[in-house]
Image (cartoon, rainbow, N blue to C red):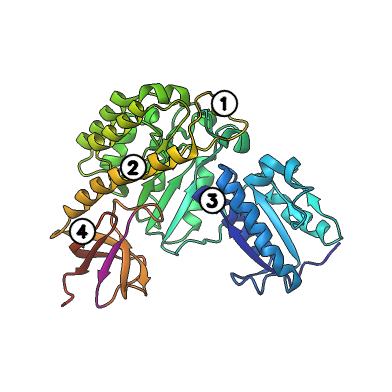
Amino acid sequence: MTDLRGKVFGLISLGCDKNRVDAEKLLAAISSRGFKITDDINKAQVLIINTCAFLNEARKEAIDTILEYSSYKSENLEKIVVTGCLPQKYISEIFDELVEADVFLGTEDYDRFFEALEKSYEGKRVNFVGLGENKDSTLRLITTPAHYAYLKIADGCNNRCTYCLIPKIRGQYKSFPMETLLKEAEELGDVAELIIVAQDVTRYGIDLYGQKKISEFLQNVTTLVNINSVRLLYCYPDMIDDELIAEIRDNPKIVKYIDIPLQHSEDGVLKLMNRPQGREKYLALIKKLRDNIPGIAIRSTFIAGFPTETVEQFEGLKSFLKEARLDNCGFFAYSREPDTAAYRLKGQISSSVKRARVKTLYQVQKQISAEKLKSNIGKTIKVLCDGIDYDKNCFIGRAYFQAPDIDGKVYFNAYSAVQGEYYDVLIEESDSYDLYGRTEDYDI
């Protein structure tokens, strides 16, 4: 058996925040055994590349990353370990071709990491995909800034959207036990903002407890003294009920922000997507949220160029954005993914048309976002300091309506500011994405 003592480990995690949580647990397992971890590729002897495979672009990024870092094998790097969604779904296609990688582990094989690595040091390329027992751990080595962290409360998905590979990669929806999640959250230490994630957080508990438990979980996690606030991402529209709305409204620790991936507005397109509800129900839900939770920030994502999407349906989506006036939106061109139901649909739309439609949607939302942000000029808002922007020579932070990485920022001047602390910032300028201001005691 190979002695791994003295080896230095590095990790690159690609894809979503849910993938990040998996990577952080693997890093914690490595660290708990006393191994050194580095963020300098020149020092790493074992490099782990945690991959995404949701879209073709993500698969290309993963493969390009593996090929790029394989060049370091001529220097200090000894082994490349590929984990996550890419090997989980495509191991039969990539194992023989991607010879630059030494070890492959799927999404539930992290407990076999050291065993697989040891075998690779015996001179063999190793495929351990599907051999793990998914022994989950609450220990994490946080890779985000220290004041915020993600908590993944479930894996997999049951929604069966016709464009999506997640059920084929991650399997059926699986809620994690509430007591385990609360222990994990407590072990994170002092967290200014805990971000709750899953492919569908609103479905939490149905498979495990026979009923939705997201509201009960939120009640419990917000009682932890080390958690200052909680933000919700990825709430599916048909699962947002009165109980959840009331919990968001009445619980002072829950950020008044919700991410609802609507994906489209027009009923015909949504039906082909196998998505619930439709335009009028979506507008009614948005109104209900705003009526019940004053000032709530609503974010969503939309797909342009889904098969058969007509010009009229695209114009309908544009008009929906103008009527809904969401706070933040992401737009994506439909990606035709093999092994999905939508792949076989007739009426596929050209790449150039899809790109043009995405660009147009961003322009529509840009104007809406600019108007919303401009309304903050002259107001003093609470901002969580994320650190310093050395290029702009000021502090950088986020208001409640801004989630990390996906929304805009607040750039502000202050005599001093501490990462993870809140500051009252007087907003003086805005653009279509960000706000600019100063603490009120700061003299210009």
What's the amino acid at mark 1?
Answer: Ala
Find residue 414 and report its image quarter.
bottom left
Label 3 and label 1: CA atoms lie apart by 23 Å
Q: Please state which of the two labelled residues, at mark 4 or mark 1, is closer to the viewer.
A: 1
Label 4 and label 1: CA atoms lie apart by 46 Å
Q: Does 299 appear above or below 49?
A: above
* Span shown in magenta: 408-415
Q: Earlier along the polypeptide chain: callout 4 or callout 1?
A: 1
Q: Determine whether label 4 and label 2 are within 8 Å by CB.
A: no
* The N terminus lies in quadrant: bottom right
What's the amino acid at mark 4?
Answer: Ile
Give the labeled residue for mark 2: 360
Residue 223 appears in the picture as rendered: yes
Label 2 and label 1: CA atoms lie apart by 27 Å
Image label count = 4
Q: Earlier along the polypeptide chain: callout 2 or callout 1?
A: 1
Q: Residue at x 63, y 56 (%)?
A: 64
Label 2 and label 3: CA atoms lie apart by 25 Å
Label 3 and label 4: CA atoms lie apart by 32 Å
Residue 437 place in picture, x, y as percent: 21, 66
Residue 103 place in picture, x, y as percent: 75, 54
Give the labeled residue for mark 4: 381
Give the labeled residue for mark 1: 341
